[in-house]
Amino acid sequence: MEITIASDADQPLWDDIVVNSSEGTLFHTWKWLKIMEKHSSKKSFSGRYKGKLYPLIVWKGKEIIGLMPVFFYDTPYLKIASSPPLSVEVGYLGPVMKKKMDITSYKQQIDFHEFQKKIDNFLKNTLNSNYIRIKTSPGVSDPRPFIWSNYEVTPDYTYMIDLSVGEKKIWENFSHTVRKRINYAKKNGLTVETGDKEDIEIIYNLLNGRQRIQATKEYIVEIFENLPRENVKIFVAKKDDIPLTGRILICYKNKVSAWMGTPKSSIDGISPNYILYWESILWACNNNFKHFEIIGAADPTTYPFKVQFSGEIAPFYTMKWHSSLNRLMSSLYHGLYPHYK
C-alpha cells in the first residue's frame, strides 16, 4: 500500500468516497475540512500554532482503500497529529474506508489493518508526531488495529434516535419530564422557527457565556455560508418573537445531527431546550431522515438532559499514542503537579 496527499483537484473523488462510505460524515467532506484547517489551532506557552491539513489517501496498486484527514500542529514542545482537529467543535473524524460490495469480511479486516499501519507509519515517521489523537466516527466498529499498534483505546458515545418508528412512538419513548416540559412550553407560547446567519451570534454568545465553546464565531459563520443549505440548518426557540436559544443541525445522507447550541437556559421557569429538540426531531421526521443524533452522550454534565430523549447509545472510539519521551515527560509533569489533569 502507498499513501498520497490529496489536493484540491481530488475533491470530487474524495467527496464521492465519503458519501458512499458508512464511516463518512459531513465533517469529512472536502469543504468542511478546508474551513477547519483555516480556523484550527493549538495554544502553546509560546503562542498559538495553526493546524495543517493532511488529507491522506491510501492505495493498493491503482485502487483506493480508504481516506484519513489528519491535522498536524508543529509546536515547540509537541508535534501533534489529530483527527479531528482542535478547537473547531468537531467530536469525531478519523478513517473512511472505501465501500466495496464484492469483498469478504476477512479481506475488509485485513485491508483495514494494513491501512492503519500505513497511516501510523506516516504520522510517526514522516510527520515525526510525538502525540497522536484519533476519534473515529460512529461507523467504525473495529479498533483492534490501533490496539495492536500500542494506542490507548477508549470508547466514546453518541445518541441515535430511530426516526423510522414514527412521530407517535418517538414521543412515547421520551421521558415523562420531556413530554411535560414540551407541552408546558407550548402552552406558554414558546415557538420554534427556522433561523438564519444572524441567529449564529445569539447561539454563540450563549455558549461562550457559559464557557461551552472553543471555536470562533467566524468559523461557525463560514461553515454556514459555505456549506449547502440542505446540509446546515438553524432552529431558534422564541417567545413573543424574542429569540431565547438555538441549535445548529447538520444534515448528511440519512442522518440529522444536533451539532451545536442549546445551552441551558430558561424564561419564567420554562426551559426552551426541550421544545427545540422536539421540533428539530419532527423536522427530521418530516424530511424523511432515518436517524437523529444527539451528540455528546459521554459528557456527564449533559447526560441527565440528553438521556431523557431515549436515544440508543452508538459507540465510537478515541485512540491516543504518545512517544516514549513524551509519555515520560507527561508522567513527570503530572507527578509534580497532580492537581492538573
Image: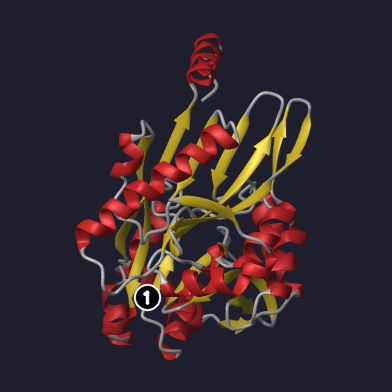
Q: Measuring 47% from the left and 70% from the top, which residue is drawn there?
A: 17
Which element type, helix, strand or loop, lies under badge 1?
Answer: strand
The amino acid marked with disc number 1 is: His
Judging depth in this view, the residue of 146 and 248 nearest the camera is 146
Placement of 43 over or under 241, stated as above or below: above
Note whether residue 270 is visible: no
Q: Measuring 48% from the left and 66% from the top, which residue is drawn there?
A: 25
Q: Measuring 55% from the left and 63% from the top, which residue is drawn there?
A: 27
Placement of 127 over or under 228, stated as above or below: above
Note whether residue 66 is visible: yes
Placement of 300 over or under 278, stated as above or below: above
Quadrant in which residue 20 is drawn: bottom left
Judging depth in this view, the residue of 310 and 135 nearest the camera is 135
Judging depth in this view, the residue of 151 and 42 nearest the camera is 151
On screen, residue 72 versus residue 180, left or right, reads: right
Quadrant in which residue 101 is drawn: bottom left
x, y percentage for residue 45?
Answer: 74, 25
On screen, residue 151 versus residue 3, left or right, reads: left
x, y percentage for residue 150?
Answer: 36, 30
x, y percentage for residue 139?
Answer: 36, 62
On screen, residue 83 versus residue 95, left or right, reads: right
